[in-house]
Image (spheres, grey):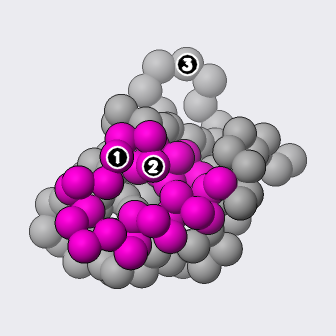
Amino acid sequence: MAARRRIPEDEGRSAVRAWRQAADRSAVDRATVATAVRHTVTALAESAPGRSVEVRVPPFAAVQCVEGPVHTRGTPPAVIETDPQTWLAVATGETTWDDAVESGDVRVSGQRTDLSAWLPLTAAS
């Protein structure tokens, strides 16, 4: 079952585009960053359906994705967490998954936390 898209497609793509085109990304308004993050994590959940990994991009979004053992309560066995700027850079292909993990900008724990098969999200940007 596909994740329910909360952000209209055109709004999500527009927010990602605005973030990508900004000369100073740290100055992009909070609402635009939030929309871009929510749009891209939803796109990830749609391209990698499942509930074995939780991807967290605080304070804007968290999704479960990737096939495997399902958890129903508490912290999932596999967690990925990063900040919005790093997530958008990885989601759009400006930073590779491996580089972001190696630098510590993306923190992973548990199995199935290599998202490089689904990133960058070409459908999201």
Using the image as rendered, state which of residue 3 and residue 20 is in the foreground: 20
Is residue 108 something one can see in this rendering?
no
Tell me the element at label 1.
Answer: loop
Residue at the outermost top position: 73
Note whether 61 is above or below 118 in the view shown.
Answer: above
Q: In front: mark 3 or mark 2? A: 2
Q: Give the residues in magenta.
A: 11-40
Q: Earlier in the sequence, mark 3 or mark 2?
A: 2
* Amino acid at circle 3: Arg
Residue 93 badge: none
Is residue 21 shown left or right of residue 117?
A: left
* Amino acid at circle 1: Asp
Q: Position of residue 35 (x, y in %)?
A: 52, 47
| Alpha carbon separation for disc pair 3 and 2 | 32 Å
- Cβ–Cβ under 8 Å for marks 3 and 2: no
Note whether 71 is above or below 121 in the view shown.
Answer: above
Q: Position of residue 116 (x, y in %)?
A: 46, 76
Q: Position of residue 70 (x, y in %)?
A: 64, 37
Residue tagged by mark 1? 29
Residue tagged by mark 3? 73
Residue tagged by mark 2? 32
- Cβ–Cβ under 8 Å for marks 1 and 3: no
Q: Position of residue 57 (x, y in %)?
A: 38, 43
Residue at the outermost right position: 1
- Residue sitting at x 21%, y 66%: 24
